[in-house]
Amino acid sequence: MTLAWYTREIDPDGLFSSVLRKEQGNNPMRYFNEQVETLFDEGKATADPEARKKVYEEIMNTAILDDTALVKLKTMEIKWAANKKVEGLTLLPKGYPNFYDWKWVG
């Protein structure tokens, strides 16, 4: 199975459920594991961060290590640069620039 995707999501559910759940649009390889489906439901139903971490670790161990549903081929690094006359350059939590706060000075 292959995967061509990237994410800057803080929560793992958005990316991994879209590629590892049976009925999702980014699962063209039709990966399916009943245990993984159950774990995703459990992860979504839990608000406790530590409990969710354990659930998603188990999803990754099952889908990636046991089933080899996904294989990481490359990591892409993105670098941002700006002119010295730009102030307010900050990155959003997902790693993208917050253009709304930028100001041109000079």
Image (cartoon, rainbow, N blue to C red):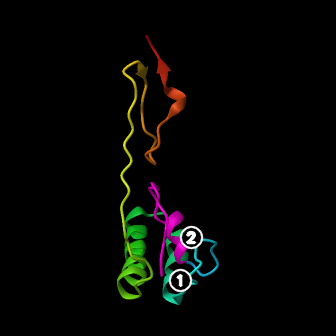
Earlier along the polypeptide chain: callout 1 or callout 2?
Answer: 2
Report the mark closest to the observer, 1 or 2: 2
Q: Is residue 4 magenta?
A: yes
- Is 19 located above or below residue 8 in the figure? below
Q: How many marks?
A: 2
Give the secondary structure at mark 2. Answer: helix
Look at label 2 and name its amino acid.
Answer: Ser
Q: Which residue is the site of mark 1?
A: 38
Q: Residues within 10 Å of mark 2 (few under 14, many from 20)?
A: some
Residue 6: x %, y % from top left: 47, 60
Q: Residue at x 46, y 41 (%)?
A: 92
Segment tinted magenta in the rendering: 1-20
Q: Is residue 56 magenta?
A: no
Residue 7: x %, y % from top left: 47, 58
Numbered label attached to residue 61? none
Look at label 1 and name its amino acid.
Answer: Thr
Residue 70 location, quadrant: bottom left
Q: Which residue is the site of mark 2?
A: 18
Residue 69: x %, y % from top left: 45, 82
- Is 44 located above or below residue 21 in the figure? above
Q: Residue at x 48, y 18 (%)?
A: 104
